[in-house]
């Protein structure tokens, strides 16, 4: 699920909310293909960037996003006390 309205109002920035591939189909290139399709749709809608949140432990998603050209722009950190 992608929104053309950024949650904090950043102009021209679409936001990716829900992004998942069916468990049995993971690791076959669908995630990368779907991400490219979302980017193309957002670009065609006039957006100049796509932003998303990802948990720090989600290495599969982080590797996909990093290899697709996404940079870290904010980081939320936690320590168990
Ligand atoms: C993240 C997700 C969408 C990736 O979809 P996918 O179809 O499995 O990904 P692809 O097969 O297209 O792989 C693309 C890249 O993701 C990374 N990747 C995918 N699975 C991985 C795994 N198990 N471990 C490490 N990296 C992985 C790799 O960098 C891979 O590129 P490569 O094949 O050239 O090495 C999928 O794992 C998923 O649905 N996860 C559960 C939901 C989720 O976490 N969504 C993201 C929320 S931010």
Image (spheres, rainbow, N blue to C red):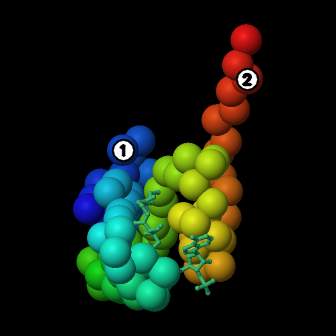
Q: Nearer the viewer, residue 5 or 52?
A: 52
The image position of residue 73, as x and y in percent, is 65, 52
| Label 2 neighbour load within 10 Å: few <14, some 14-19, many 20+ | few
Circle 1 sits in a helix, a strand or a loop, which is it?
A: loop
How many angstroms separate mark 2 from mark 1 (CA)?
A: 27 Å
The image position of residue 51, as x and y in percent, is 48, 60
Q: Is residue 43 visible?
A: no
Q: Residue at x 35, y 68 (%)?
A: 23
Name the mark nearer the viewer: 2 or 1.
2
Residue ranking furthest to the top: 81
- Tell which circle, 2 or 1, labels the residue nearer the N-terminal end: 1
Image quadrant containing the N terminus: bottom left
Image quadrant containing the C terminus: top right
Q: Residue at x 63, y 60 (%)?
A: 59
The image position of residue 15, as x and y in percent, is 38, 58
Q: Residue at x 67, y 64 (%)?
A: 71
Residue 37 vs 55, above or below: the answer is below
Residue underneath mark 1: 7
Q: Nearer the viewer, residue 28 or 42?
A: 28
Residue underneath mark 2: 79
The image position of residue 16, as x and y in percent, is 37, 60
Is the residue indicated by label 1 positioned so its CB lies within 8 Å of ligand 1? no
| Residue 80: quadrant of the picture | top right
Q: Is residue 50 left or right of residue 18?
A: right
């Amino acid at each position: 699920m992608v929104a053309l309205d950024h949650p904090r109002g950043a102009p021209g920035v679409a936001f990716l909310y829900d992004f998942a591939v069916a468990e049995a189909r993971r690791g076959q290139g669908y995630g990368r293909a779907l991400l490219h399709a979302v980017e193309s749709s957002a670009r065609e809608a006039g957006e100049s960037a796509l932003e998303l949140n990802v948990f720090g432990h989600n290495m599969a998603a982080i590797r996909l996003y990093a290899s697709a050209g996404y940079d870290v722009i904010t980081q939320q950190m936690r320590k168990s006390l």
